[in-house]
Image (spheres, coloured by chain):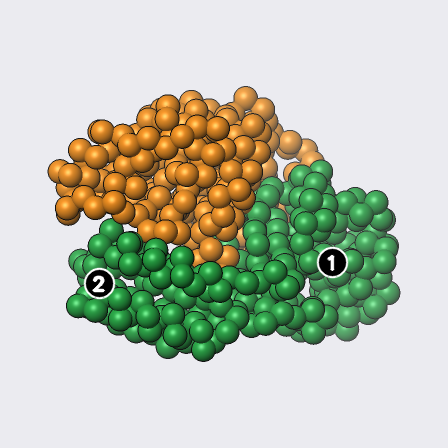
Chain colours: A orange, B green
Amino acid sequence: MSDALQPTAAVLIIGNEILSGKTQDANLQFLGVELARLGITLVEARVVRDDRATIAHHVNELRSLYSYVFTTGGIGPTHDDITAEAVAYAFGSELVLDEEAVGRLQRHGRALNEARLKMARIPAGATLIDNPVSHAPGFRLDNVFVFAGIPRIAAAMFESAARELARGSTIHSASLDVFCKEGDIAAPLAAIAAAHPEVEIGSYPFSRDGRFGANLVVRGTDAARVEEVLGEISRALAGIDIEASPVR
Amino acid sequence: MSDALQPTAAVLIIGNEILSGKTQDANLQFLGVELARLGITLVEARVVRDDRATIAHHVNELRSLYSYVFTTGGIGPTHDDITAEAVAYAFGSELVLDEEAVGRLQRHGRALNEARLKMARIPAGATLIDNPVSHAPGFRLDNVFVFAGIPRIAAAMFESAARELARGSTIHSASLDVFCKEGDIAAPLAAIAAAHPEVEIGSYPFSRDGRFGANLVVRGTDAARVEEVLGEISRALAGIDIEASPVR
């Protein structure tokens, strides 16, 4: 896929609860879909524990590699919420009490105690990211965007932050389901993939209602090409039971 | 949590479909739960694209850092399945046709074409991991375990591989839900966490049926200590509406 001009991104998911299996992450899928829509290539994601040095190490590595880094989790008021502190540490910055953040918490929250004030301490030089759901803001420092972990809040923060992002060409995708085993279609599919480096072709096997199948996905920045290549795949697999899905 | 003696692990999730948001990963949560049961600390996870050099880079970095690496995805017959090739490249090894793997595919599959034979090519020196679901095996090379991406098959392969893993002390957890805002309980919770470094205490906010709450989780290798600390938390928060969950 010719995406050399697209901005790039990484997602850093912060939280022991994801690695213990206690919580199923839902933010990566959301961010993957939204970033594709904005033409930003999500290159990788990492899930790390609530440890200051660890978080800082990954923030620094990822922010040097990609246009944007989006972190989720660890910005609440409890002792295990250490993302702001870790991001400050990564940048060699310090946490400062942000008056605007204090004001938002005062207008919307309960009495401000020391734990709640923690949510208003952000690294020096950072700017706030609006949180229309629960009002404790996220923040942006350079190319690093720090979001809450709760999916509804992370989504709202992404929406707030999206207007600050450079955009590439939207990545379109179209897919069809074929009801056969992947081994039966691998050769023609490989030939089509080799002939069309301008799109990305993926094959994702499934078993549904006792039938084997594969979801064949074409992705690219040119919606018409995506449709054409999907048509080519469909014709090459003539004779196989196929269900087409519309372009998304 | 005093887990310095526990084996460690990383999960490497391979597949563009996870990063595009097309597919919701389900293997990380499964592996997190199972590894905790075996007393293996899952330290981090990464999600990367179907790119040989990228996969090889992360395999090499993770296998040097942790006792075990578990990869998921990319071992099917289609052109975008490049995990075996990438792992061989990471180890400076070559793909060889494994006669035992060929036999398993012959006994259980359709006619062997070139695409299906690809699933029997594993890095020289690797050993097979049984796949009782669809028979195309995974493989182990040194401390790297290569599983399929389909959750049912990844789970079966983990079960096959588990007997080869060194075990630590099972990580127990107990939790309770408190119906209040996290900011109201952060101070007593922090004090208890500071007094009990032998366990890990996490607070995970939620909103349910219009009520705010937090799921408080205690984890550790000593089940009795875990229960005791949870009891201490429960007493410290007397007066708040609490629902206890049993030790898992």
Residue drawn at x 36%, y 51% as measured from the top left: A79
Q: Mark 2 falls within which chain? A: B
**Residue B122, percent across and down?**
80, 56
> How far is mark 1 from mark 2, CA to CA?
44 Å
Q: Would residue A87 appear left or right of A99 to someone viewing this image?
A: right
- Examine the rendered structure and indicate whether residue A173 appears above or below residue B182: above
Looking at the figure, which quarter contains the C terminus of chain B?
bottom left
User: Disc 1 marks which residue?
Assistant: B143
Q: Is residue A11 visible?
A: yes
Subunit under mark 1: B
Residue B206, horizontal then vertical, whole percent: 28, 57
Q: Position of residue B107 (x, y in %)?
A: 77, 73
Image marks 1 and 2: residues in contact by CB distance under 8 Å: no
Q: Residues within 10 Å of mark 2 (few under 14, many from 20)?
A: some
In which quadrant of the rendered view does residue A194 lie?
top right
Q: Is residue B113 above or below residue A10?
A: below
Q: Which residue is pictured at 39% across the width and 52% down the height? A: A80
Residue occupied by mark 2: B179
Q: Amino acid at mark 2?
A: Phe
Residue B140, how many percent across, how many down?
75, 61
> Is residue A168 rendered to the left or right of residue B12?
left
